[in-house]
Amino acid sequence: MDDAMLPTAERAHGGAPHRDSSRHPAVAAFVDALRAARAAGGDERAMLARVAPLCAGLAARRREWLQPSLFTPDPEQGFGLQVLHEESDHALAVFVVTWLPGRSTMPHDHGTWAVIAGLEGTERNALWERLDDRTRPGYAELRRTGERTVGPGELILLPSDSIHSVVNDTDEVTVSLHAYGRHVNFNARSQFDPVARTESPYQVRVQE
């Protein structure tokens, strides 16, 4: 996706060089391992299999590196994304995502693979399947197919064709680690309204 197509905030964030919000040794080792996983090649399934234990390992060490400065919920959006790492080509983007109590997302895709690990609290992920033939612009039919609850140290692996929605239905702020094959604001991705049967482009605000 061309930078000119992004809102100002996303252009300012996404167009900058390689970034790390934390250079704690645990994070640095995770980033090195993530790069090695990408360099090993293979298909998306192989990449997910390699990245999952890396995310689990970093989540297990969260007490070492997870600082209060990374807890940045966005009241308007309902959740905040803080960059933990992003490559200069926007690949291998890693975020700490903080959810406010009672907030949720519409069903959406990512346009890339994702591994999500719980850090603090519990989040519910609903999984969806697209039923239409994708020939009508702006139209989509979805069916809910399942649910996964992600708590501290637990993982959910999402291939690039996955659609999910997330809710924090607890009374506490929840926090999760998200690793993506590419920064989500640089992918063609969508959000969906299952009731109205609509599909629309999806961008998120990312905090420095």
Image (cartoon, rainbow, N blue to C red):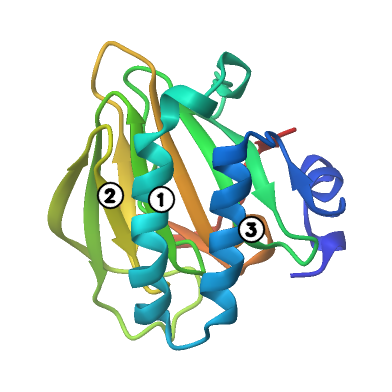
Instruction: Using the image as rendered, state which of residue 119 and residue 81 is in the foreground.
Output: 119
| Residue 162 can be seen in this image | yes
Instruction: Residue 94: give x, y in percent of width and height.
Output: 57, 49
Q: Residue 176, image x and y in percent?
A: 41, 36
139 left or right, relative to 36: left
Q: Position of residue 204 (x, y in %)?
A: 61, 44
Determine the residue positioned at 59% across, 79% down. 39
- Decide if residue 94 is on the left or right side of residue 62: right
Left/right placement of residue 44 relative to residue 12 reads left
Q: Are marks 2 and 1 in contact (CB under 8 Å)?
A: yes
Establish if 12 lies above or below 31.
Answer: above
Query: Which amino acid type is shown beneath numbered disc 1?
Result: Cys
Instruction: Give the residue type that dot 2 points to.
Output: Leu
Above or below, comparing residue 145 to residue 155 in the picture: below
**Residue name at image x 54 percent, y 28 percent:** 65
The image quadrant that residue 198 belongs to is bottom left
Q: Earlier in the sequence, mark 3 or mark 1?
A: 1
Pointer 3 residue: 183
Q: How many marks?
A: 3
Q: Which residue is mark 2?
A: 155
Q: Residue furthest left?
A: 146
Quickly name the residue at label 1.
55
Dot in front, 3 or 2 = 2
Rate crowding at label 2 as few (under 14), some (14 to 19) or many (20 or more) other CA atoms within 10 Å.
many
Of helix, strand and loop, which one carries label 1?
helix
Q: Foreground residue, 32 or 48? A: 32
Of 137 and 148, nearer the camera is 148
Q: Does 167 appear above or below 182?
A: above
Mark pair 2, 1: CA separation: 8 Å
Q: In 3D space, how far apart are the residues under numbered discs 3 and 1 (Cα atoms)? A: 17 Å
